[in-house]
Image: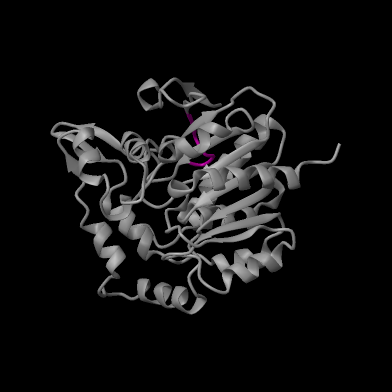
């Protein structure tokens, strides 16, 4: 059963189609929380499409990318465990890898497939791309096609070393990215204060103002002293540190059409990933966006939209 309620405060007034806020309870987690997601095009006979966000973000962050596609796709964009409005347990001490996200996503896809009777198109940014790859490799029966947006594909040796280090019975010095996430300020006086603190700075320096505003609207909740980030810094840091998943094995097992857009500046999609993706699907789009950073969906939303349409076109069931 899907609980669907309007969430007007979470909707862009400029969006061509307003999403609804909905929830599902994955099997086996009843009483332990729900997965929350935004949905465009519900009830329409359109191709189902799921979008998975990056670590520390939320589904609403990508509204400017997704809303223009609402007349062409039945879209769901989740808040992953530990993010946004999703209430599933997120204990940093137990977060060692991203397989838990893949299992959560499979629960989402089972629900989406059951409701629409169709396989689902997937797209994901950064951790969301890797999560979508893991899920697609495990359950190809639910997936029609996969669009990876600068997924986290670090060299296998480095990934294995991170797994070994994470399993040691004592703490070691974290990477700079992990430490930076752990130190993030989590509470602010208001959402306006969060937007002011982020606009044009750090990771947000290439983002349009509206996307920063959507990120804050979907990724904060009210507390007694103001607002707080819904993705706790310790959880974001645990995601950066936890690599007890194997994206390379998933890529070798992949049986569905796949395409890749990756960054020309500071990409997390390292060699030989682009070549292996091209080998996995001879018809795949493999495009390096040379002027884009890791935040390419924010910088080139129109390119992401065009590739989503192209993937839908080449995976459309023959009638």
Residue occupying image coordinates x 42% and y 35%:
31
Q: Nearer the viewer, residue 104 or 54?
A: 54
Q: Is residue 143 visible?
A: no
Residue occupying image coordinates x 18% and y 42%:
187
- Residue extent of the magenta highlight: 22-29
Residue 301, how many percent across, how many down? 50, 44
Q: Is residue 73 above or below residue 124?
A: above
Residue 183, how many percent across, how many down? 20, 57
Q: Is residue 109 above or below residue 41?
A: below
Q: Is residue 66 visible?
A: yes
- Most frequent secondary structure within the magenta stretch: loop
Q: Nearer the viewer, residue 69 or 257?
A: 69
- Color encoding of the figure: one colour
- Report if residue 25 lies within the magenta region: yes
From the viewer's perspective, tell me whether residue 222 is left or right of residue 69.
left
From the viewer's perspective, tell me whether residue 43 is left or right of residue 262.
right
How many labels sit on residues?
A: 0
From the viewer's perspective, tell me whether residue 201 is left or right of residue 74.
left
Farthest residue to the front: give it: 291
In which quadrant of the rendered image does the C terminus lie?
top right
Q: Nearer the viewer, residue 213 or 109?
A: 213
Q: Quadrant of residue 72?
A: top right
- Report if residue 96 lies within the magenta region: no
In which quadrant of the rendered image does the N terminus lie?
top right
Residue 49, how many percent across, how many down? 61, 39
Residue occupying image coordinates x 60% and y 35%:
111
């Amino acid at each position: 059963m899907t609980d669907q309620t309007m969430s007007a405060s979470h909707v862009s007034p400029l969006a061509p189609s307003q999403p609804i806020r909905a929830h599902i309870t994955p099997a086996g987690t009843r009483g332990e929380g729900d997965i929350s997601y935004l949905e465009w095009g519900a009830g329409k006979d359109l191709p189902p499409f799921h979008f998975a966000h990056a670590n520390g973000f939320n589904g609403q962050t990508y509204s400017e990318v997704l809303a223009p596609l609402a007349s062409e796709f039945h879209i769901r964009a989740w808040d992953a465990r530990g993010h946004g409005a999703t209430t599933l347990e997120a204990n940093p001490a137990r977060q060692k890898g991203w397989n838990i996200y893949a299992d959560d996503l499979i629960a989402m896809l089972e629900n989406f497939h059951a409701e629409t009777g169709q396989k689902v198109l997937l797209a994901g940014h950064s951790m969301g791309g890797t999560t979508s790859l893991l899920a697609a490799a495990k359950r190809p029966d639910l997936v029609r096609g996969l669009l990876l947006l600068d997924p986290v594909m670090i060299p296998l040796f480095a990934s294995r070393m991170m797994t070994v280090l994470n399993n040691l019975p004592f703490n070691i010095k974290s990477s700079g990215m992990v430490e930076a996430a752990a130190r993030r300020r989590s509470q602010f006086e208001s959402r306006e204060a969060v937007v002011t603190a982020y606009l044009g700075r750090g990771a947000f320096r290439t983002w349009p103002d509206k996307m920063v505003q959507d990120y804050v609207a979907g990724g904060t909740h009210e507390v007694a002293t103001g607002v707080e980030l819904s993705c706790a810094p310790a959880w974001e840091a645990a995601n950066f540190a936890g690599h007890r998943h194997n994206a390379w094995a998933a890529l070798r097992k992949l049986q569905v059409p796949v395409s890749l857009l990756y960054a020309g500046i500071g990409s997390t999609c390292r060699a030989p990933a682009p070549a292996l993706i091209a080998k996995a699907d001879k018809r795949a789009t493999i495009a390096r966006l040379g002027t884009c950073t890791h935040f390419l969906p924010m910088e080139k939303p129109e390119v992401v939209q065009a590739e989503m349409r192209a993937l839908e076109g080449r995976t459309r069931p023959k009638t």
